[in-house]
Amino acid sequence: MLVQMTSPDFNKLILKGVTPDGRKFRPSDWAERLCGNLCTFRNRRMYYSPLLRPAVIDGVKCVIVDAKLSDQYQNIYDDVVRFAAKNKLQTEKAQ
């Protein structure tokens, strides 16, 4: 499912690391790499932005995208949506 790149109609978008044939998406650190676009470093630790963060849901690696990302960082939001579409990742809108 391709999500519109303008005016999201959701509060959160969940990208699931599952391929169309049901296998885990590789590489295994894809979520952390994708979320690294907005992370910050303090005291030698990485902190993910609440707008774009990795998660594990029901044992599946996911990325949670806050709809506010499209307002504050449109280019990053567009890249994330294109990444999900290009790799045919399962997506789910949440309110």
Image (spheres, rainbow, N blue to C red):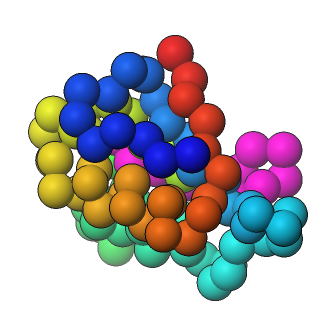
Q: Residue at x 84, y 53 (%)?
A: 59
Is residue 83 or residue 40 the one in the foreground?
Answer: 83
**How many numbered discs?**
0
User: Is 57 colored magenta in this rendering?
Assistant: yes
- Residue furthest out toward the bottom: 27
Quarter occupied by residue 79: bottom left
Q: Is residue 8 above or below residue 41?
A: above
- Residue furthest out toward the top: 95
- From this viewpoint, is residue 46 visible? no
Q: Residue at x 64, y 84 (%)?
A: 27
Quarter occupied by residue 87: bottom right
- From this viewpoint, is residue 74 visible? yes
Please state if 5 lies on the left or on the right of 95 as rendered. Answer: left
Q: Is residue 87 above or below residue 26?
A: above
Could you tell me residue 77's position as x and y percent?
28, 50
User: Is 75 colored magenta in this rendering?
Assistant: no
Is residue 15 or residue 28 the one in the foreground?
Answer: 15
Could you tell me residue 90's position as x and y percent?
66, 51
Is residue 20 or residue 33 the one in the foreground?
Answer: 20
Q: Main secondary structure of the magenta part?
A: strand
Q: Residue at x 52, y 15 (%)?
A: 95
Could you tell me residue 71's position as x and y percent?
15, 34
Q: Is residue 59 above or below residue 29?
A: above
Q: Residue at x 76, y 63 (%)?
A: 20
Highlighted magenta segment, given as a residue range: 50-61
Is residue 71 or residue 32 the one in the foreground?
Answer: 71
